């Protein structure tokens, strides 16, 4: 088209005939009118989109206070409408209409867009309208964010971008301030994860923790009968931080409550002191008192006498909580401030074990113990959703040249842990399979699963996360720091839209 126009104007410039000017003038008028019409109608479509979003927000806000008088209800709707469609926005808006019946609240609005080009045809303004209806018995939302807090999230300011995006989602779903932001219509939980998940050191005595070392995992890292809580008591300046091991199969990928079977309870996390060679990652105690061969690395690592009276330097990052120094998870709550505090506390530390995080997201949203804030799965008045974000594949240090073949993590070591792996690489493949199993189990309960791969180029993990999402459109592929904000806004809007009846 540009070539044709260029050729036309060159011919016009060379032509001295007056007829050319006449033809050009006749042709130019409809062309300009068409361009102007497109501009005016484009402004009208933009205004309609903003108008629709604004009345959706107004209707949802009004429905959050159904006991207000009609006048108060309208004032609340106007407040939220104006916040989303300010007076300086394009178009003159008639007073919005708010109507309440026994079962619904409706909000409608009309806007008038002054034209610029269509005035030539005598059209001085374009009218746009929007209408929405919210059921007063609208569905509630239960959401758990399962968010990567591994060391790589510290690169390129990613952890701060994640905090900002998660905070925006909380603001959207828990709109308002003070008591109004703490309504029971929306509950949100948070599960930060790295190599394991911190459920809180205050959970001793709840019946959830294998405090008597009866689980089949209890002797996995030491001699049979060793209770890691006793080892913590022997160390002068370290205590159990609240992280837990993954349960044995099949309990690691389901939400079965802790019960009589010891394998349904969680073993406290204790990363052993490793042999004193540079290739080992977690070295914090000497082997004084060990009588075996210095080349029997496994025996040296299992020796428990070295923990008696141990004092670990305060500055040391190594220790029994190694690879799991992340904040405690936040159970689902209606209190906005509790969720915001959990988001702000997130840090970047440790390696990536996705099923450790996702399994606890499953348990936090579950109606059964260990956390019981969730509604029943068959409650038709509740929308349940999980957001899973990772910036990397399952990674337990598969290439480490040690007898453990990995870093310590929720599944123990690759070589001796309960993954049944012969190597770290094989362990990571098994973790992928467990992630897929968890996704299947979660979706089978009717939980909506949103997945995000954050600034990733890895093809297999993208395929895994795409398959995990409830729908293809609920998978978000590698947004930038800036784009992550829009992703969380899109998810929040999608959840809110599920509550709008029309």
Image (cartoon, rainbow, N blue to C red):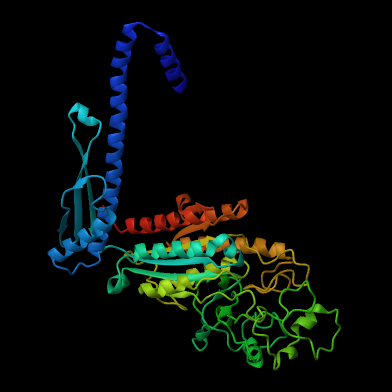
Left or right: 305 as drawn, with respect to 3: right
Q: Which of 116 and 242 lies nearest the eye of the viewer?
A: 116
Residue 45: which quarter of the image? top left
Residue 63 shows in this picture: yes
Q: Which of 468 and 452 lies nearest the eye of the viewer?
A: 452
Please name the residue shown 62% across and 70% down the image: 350
Q: Which of 464 and 492 lies nearest the eye of the viewer?
A: 492
> Residue 275, image x and y in percent?
78, 79
Residue 417: which quarter of the image? bottom right
> Residue 271, image x and y in percent?
67, 79
Please name the residue shown 35% across and 62% down the image: 172
> Residue 248, image x and y in percent?
61, 74
> Residue 428, image x and y in percent?
66, 63
Q: Quadrant of the N terminus?
A: top left
Residue 136 shows in this picture: no
- Judge whether 490 appears above or below 423 on screen: above
């Amino acid at each position: 088209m540009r070539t044709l126009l260029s050729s036309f104007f060159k011919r016009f410039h060379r032509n001295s005939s007056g007829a050319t000017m006449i033809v050009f003038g006749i042709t130019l008028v409809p062309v300009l009118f068409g361009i102007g019409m497109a501009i005016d109608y484009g402004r009208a479509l933009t205004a309609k989109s903003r108008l629709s979003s604004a009345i959706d927000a107004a209707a949802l806000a009004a429905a959050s206070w159904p006991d207000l008088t009609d006048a108060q209800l309208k004032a609340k709707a106007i407040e939220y409408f104006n916040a989303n469609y300010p007076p300086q926005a394009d178009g003159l808006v008639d007073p919005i209409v708010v109507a309440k019946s026994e079962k619904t609240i409706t909000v409608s609005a009309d806007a008038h867009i002054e034209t610029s080009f269509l005035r030539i045809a005598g059209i001085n303004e374009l009218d746009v309208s929007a209408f929405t209806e919210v059921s007063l018995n609208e569905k509630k939302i239960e959401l758990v964010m399962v968010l990567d807090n591994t060391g790589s999230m510290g690169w390129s300011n990613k952890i701060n971008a994640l905090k900002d995006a998660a905070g925006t989602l909380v603001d959207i779903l828990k709109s308002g301030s003070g008591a109004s932001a703490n309504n029971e219509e929306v509950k949100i939980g948070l599960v930060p994860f790295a190599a394991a998940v911190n459920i809180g050191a205050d959970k001793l005595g709840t019946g959830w923790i294998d405090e008597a070392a009866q689980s089949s995992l209890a002797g996995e890292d030491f001699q049979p009968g060793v209770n890691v809580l006793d080892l913590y008591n022997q160390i002068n300046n370290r205590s159990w931080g609240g992280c837990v091991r993954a349960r044995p199969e099949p309990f690691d990928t389901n939400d079965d409550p802790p019960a009589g079977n010891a394998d349904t309870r969680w073993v406290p996390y204790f990363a052993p002191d490793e042999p004193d060679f540079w290739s080992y990652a977690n070295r914090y105690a000497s082997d004084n008192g060990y009588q075996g061969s210095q080349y029997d690395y496994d025996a040296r690592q299992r020796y428990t006498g070295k923990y008696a009276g141990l004092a670990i330097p305060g500055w040391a990052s190594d220790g029994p909580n190694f690879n799991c120094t992340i904040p405690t998870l936040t159970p689902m709550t209606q209190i906005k401030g509790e969720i915001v505090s959990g988001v702000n506390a997130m840090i970047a530390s440790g390696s990536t074990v996705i099923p450790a995080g996702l399994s606890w997201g499953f348990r936090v949203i579950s109606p059964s113990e260990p956390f019981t804030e969730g509604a029943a799965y068959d409650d038709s008045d509740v929308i349940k959703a999980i957001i899973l974000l990772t910036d990397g594949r399952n990674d337990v240090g598969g290439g480490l040249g040690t007898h453990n073949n990995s870093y310590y993590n929720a599944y123990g070591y690759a070589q001796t842990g309960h993954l049944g792996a012969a190597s770290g690489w094989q362990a990571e493949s098994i973790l992928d399979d467990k992630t897929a199993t968890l996704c299947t189990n979660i979706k089978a309960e009717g939980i909506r699963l949103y997945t995000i791969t954050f600034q990733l180029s890895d093809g297999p993990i993208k395929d895994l996360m795409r398959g995990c999402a409830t729908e293809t459109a609920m998978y978000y592929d590698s947004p930038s720091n800036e784009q992550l904000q829009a992703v969380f806004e899109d998810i929040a809007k999608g959840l809110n839209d599920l509550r709008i009846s029309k």
